[in-house]
Image (tube, grey):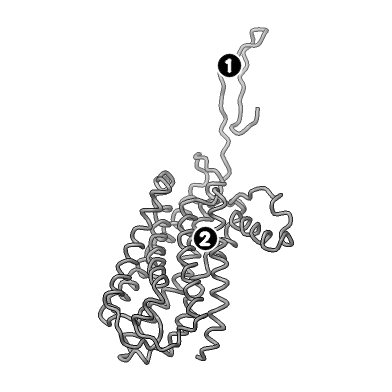
């Protein structure tokens, strides 16, 4: 693929991704209502993707991708990118675990302290990224890199170990996501079978959980078909070709496949969350000096429950008759009053 064609495709996508991820970061910082556990993980993901976007733009601006560089020079140019790429790859595994906890242990997941929970969920991605970074630093080669990609700058044995670890991490993410979806479907069916239960369920809580679940699921789906596919294809190419020079013609295609993964946080939250969407529209209002969304600040804070009630998950509260003790009126006659639950007195 021609160099200029590659840059014309990757450049605009990286600019769009950087703009979108910056919107996610600013929205979560500005609005406390957006700082839920799931949204905070998306916030951390947006930071890592934003750094990847900026690093990729730096490589395009200085045209480092197709220059003749040694492995060590290429590694130094890609230090932030290499760390954040490995971090986000493992962070998706943490997000899959968060999705699993939200479905399997909903009450405990809700009661866990938010700050401590987010820090714990980020420990594993940080350790994974640091290990890969130091291995790359210790075993980087001084030979000319056929293509300035940080995975091609290290020793072959170390690269096989790291790439295999990335593939295993991606497969675990896929399996946990599939199991979580299966359990969520079973729970939905159980709720449908017991829709006449006397247990009251608040529609807003159920709808919000469905929104969080669907948003996380869409992000995991984009990740699986973008970054995970690229990682597996790269591993297959490395195993199939003995000479790294033979892999170079396929690298631009793998780079393009991974682009949606670095741009997804903004679009998923914009289309799936009314609160995020309102925050983004406020940003667009400021950026256009008030030309777009002029009445955005006069609109009330939108609730997350916008879907219509259904028998499966949005059951209407069941009214139960509450009998109060008989009371005597002024004439000494006792009267019994029945009040239905939910009646305003």
Q: Which residue is mark 2?
A: 215
Q: Nearer the viewer, residue 304 or 264?
A: 264
Residue 273 at what x, y percent from top left?
58, 57
Q: Is residue 189 visible?
A: no
Would residue 69 be seen by someone viewing this image from the given angle? yes
Q: Gap between marks 2 and 1, in whole Å?
A: 52 Å
Disc ID at residue 140: none
Q: Which residue appears at 60% of the width and 54% of the height?
A: 275
- Viewed as shown, does residue 119 lie left or right of 302? left
- For the residue labelled by badge 1, is the local secondary structure a helix, a strand or a loop? loop
Question: Helix, strand or loop at disc 2?
Answer: helix
For image coordinates 42% across by 45% down, the residue present is 107
Q: Quadrant of residue 82?
A: bottom left
Q: Determine which residue is flagged by label 1.
A: 326
Residue lying farthest to the top in this orientation? 331
- Residue located 42% across and 78% down the image: 230
How far across and down, in percent of the image, does residue 61 sit?
52, 80
The percent coordinates of residue 283 (x first, y second) are: 64, 59
Q: In the rendered view of the protein, which quadrant contains the C terminus? A: top right
Q: Nearer the viewer, residue 111 or 287?
A: 287
Query: As drawn, which residue projects farthest toward the left?
Result: 157
Query: Is 66 above or below relative to 52?
Result: below
Q: Give the vertical position of 307 relative to 12 (above or below).
A: above
């Amino acid at each position: 693929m021609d160099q200029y064609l590659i840059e014309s495709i990757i450049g605009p996508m990286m600019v769009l991704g950087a703009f979108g991820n910056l919107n996610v970061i600013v929205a979560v910082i500005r609005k406390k209502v957006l700082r839920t556990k799931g949204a905070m993980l998306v916030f951390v993901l947006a930071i890592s993707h934003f750094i990847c976007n900026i690093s990729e733009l730096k490589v395009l601006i200085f045209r480092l991708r197709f220059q003749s560089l040694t492995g060590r020079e290429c590694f130094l140019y890609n230090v932030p990118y290499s760390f954040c790429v490995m971090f986000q790859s493992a962070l998706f595994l943490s997000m899959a675990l968060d999705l699993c906890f939200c479905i399997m242990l909903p009450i405990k997941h809700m009661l866990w302290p938010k700050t401590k929970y987010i820090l714990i969920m980020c420990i594993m991605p940080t350790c994974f990224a640091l290990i890969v970074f130091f291995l790359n630093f210790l075993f980087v080669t001084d030979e000319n890199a056929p293509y300035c990609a940080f995975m091609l700058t290290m020793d072959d044995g170390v690269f096989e170990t790291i790439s295999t670890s990335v593939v295993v991490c991606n497969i675990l993410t896929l399996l946990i996501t599939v199991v979580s979806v299966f359990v969520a479907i079973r729970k939905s069916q159980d709720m449908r079978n017991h829709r006449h239960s006397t247990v009251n369920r608040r529609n807003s809580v159920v709808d919000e959980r469905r929104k969080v679940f669907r948003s996380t699921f869409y992000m995991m789906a984009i990740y699986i078909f973008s970054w995970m596919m690229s990682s597996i294809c790269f591993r297959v190419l490395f195993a199939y070709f003995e000479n790294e020079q033979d892999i170079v013609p396929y690298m631009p295609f793998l780079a393009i496949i991974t682009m949606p993964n670095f741009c997804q946080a903004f679009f998923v939250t914009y289309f799936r969350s009314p609160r995020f969407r309102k925050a983004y529209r406020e940003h667009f209002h400021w950026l256009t000096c008030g030309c777009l969304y002029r009445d955005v600040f006069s609109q009330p804070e939108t609730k997350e429950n916008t879907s219509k009630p259904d028998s499966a998950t949005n059951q209407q509260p069941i009214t139960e008759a509450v009998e109060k003790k008989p009371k005597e009126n002024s004439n000494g006659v006792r009267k019994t009053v029945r009040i239905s639950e939910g009646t305003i007195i």
